[in-house]
Amino acid sequence: MSEKWLTGTVTENRHWTETLFSLRVEGARPRYEAGQFVRIALDTVEGDAASRVARAFSLVNPPDDPVLEFYGVIVPEGPLSPRLAKLQPGDALYVAPNPAGFLVLSEVPDAETLWLVATGTGLAPFLSILRTATPWRRFKNVVLVHAARYASELTYGELIRASAARYVTFVSREPAPGSLAGRIPAAIADGRLEKAAGLPLAPQSSHVMLCGNPQMLRDATAALAARGMRKHRRRASGHITVESFW
Ligand SMILES: Cc1cc2nc3c(=O)[nH]c(=O)nc-3n(C[C@H](O)[C@H](O)[C@H](O)COP(=O)(O)OP(=O)(O)OC[C@H]3O[C@@H](n4cnc5c(N)ncnc54)[C@H](O)[C@@H]3O)c2cc1C
Ligand SMILES: NC(=O)c1ccc[n+]([C@@H]2O[C@H](COP(=O)([O-])OP(=O)(O)OC[C@H]3O[C@@H](n4cnc5c(N)ncnc54)[C@H](OP(=O)(O)O)[C@@H]3O)[C@@H](O)[C@H]2O)c1
């Protein structure tokens, strides 16, 4: 592989639940904009053959924080995520030198309200964005929406509540006081999301950034289209920006 990888050192691996973890990594400092992702990798040695297994991960920390943070879920049959979850302080993690991605505020047109809408670990890029000055300078309102299967998976709540964002949560697989039930697209369609945020979700006022489960992105985009919103393109301004995790 000709790419020059940076080598970071794991300083912490926090386990929120049996499946969710956050890795902190020092010593690798790629340049990026809040909301971007970078490939991270580990080596596998089988017999005499060594290979590097790499996957895209969003950067959770704001760009001016020198300690990189990644937020992951264990996909039990996955080649990389179970191994990331087992990393210990002192272990090496390879980080690609070239972060990328368009889920960034420099690609988002002005609006009154910025909606940051995530399922599961799709929360990660929004945590970086929330901790920069840009959203507060550019948008009158910022709403952070996080959907998880179980209440224990509504991670990083403390950090989100410490920001000026309005925080709306969904828990889909158990009753959870304080969270909406069901899924995000249905709550866009029937007005529950607007009601919970106390703000209109309309093309005149809103830009929506969606991240996480690809089917959620499709279903939410369809629900937003029914409200007259369309995907944003550089050459045709719109109201929706998406990033799919698989
Ligand atoms: C742009 C981008 C950014 C990403 N950022 C993150 C991130 O910040 N955190 C993160 O955990 N993952 C992120 N991912 C997914 C990540 O790259 C891996 O796919 C994931 O860590 C699983 O890796 P794996 O090798 O174990 O399994 P893989 O072979 O990569 O995936 C196997 C299957 O697991 C499911 N899956 C993959 N990722 C997730 C996920 N995050 N949540 C639920 N189900 C999933 C899908 O069904 C997928 O087909 C991102 C992906 C992309 C494309
Ligand atoms: N979370 C766990 O308990 C758990 C445990 C073991 C392993 N895993 C692994 O992690 C992966 C799942 O991770 P995850 O729970 O973070 O992600 P997820 O399956 O994407 O679920 C996160 C949230 O997104 C919702 N969602 C799913 N499809 C949607 C759609 N089309 N529209 C709107 N919302 C939608 C889910 O609701 P629904 O509940 O209605 O689907 C849930 O509230 C699996 O691949 C599995 O291998 C997860």
Image: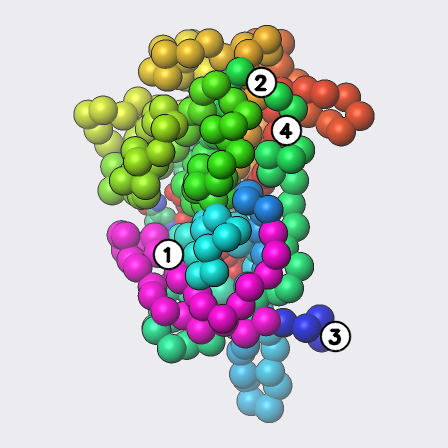
- Of badges 3 and 4, the one in the foreground is 4
Q: What span is colored magenta in the figure?
A: 6-32
| Image quadrant assignment for residue 197 | top left
| Disc 3 from disc 2: Cα separation | 42 Å
Residue at screen point 29% across, 58% down? 15
Residue 42 forms part of the magenta stretch:
no
Q: Is residue 231 left or right of residue 11?
A: right
| Crowding at mark 2 (Cα within 10 Å: few <14, some 14-19, many 20+) | some
Contact (CB < 8 A) between labels 4 and 2? yes
Kindly state the secondary structure of the residue where label 1 is placed: strand
Per the rendering, the mark at residue 2 is: 3
The disc, 1 or 3, on the residue closer to the chain's N-terminal end is: 3
- Quadrant containing ligand 2: top left
Where residue 22 sits in the image (x, y, percent)? 37, 56
Residue 14 forms part of the magenta stretch:
yes
- Of badges 3 and 2, the one in the foreground is 2
Where residue 55 sits in the image (x, y, percent)? 57, 59
- Tell me if residue 22 comes above or below residue 199 in the rendering: below
| Disc 4 from disc 1: Cα separation | 27 Å
| Disc 1 from disc 3: Cα separation | 29 Å
Kindly state the secondary structure of the residue where label 4 is placed: loop
Residue at screen point 60% across, 38% down? 104
The disc, 2 or 1, on the residue closer to the chain's N-terminal end is: 1
| Image quadrant assignment for residue 105 | top right
Which residue is under mark 4? 108
Prevailing SS of the magenta stretch: strand
Residue at screen point 59% across, 46% down? 33
- Of badges 4 and 1, the one in the foreground is 4
Quarter of the N terminus within the rendering: bottom right
**Amino acid at dot 1:** Ser
Per the rendering, the mark at residue 182 is: none
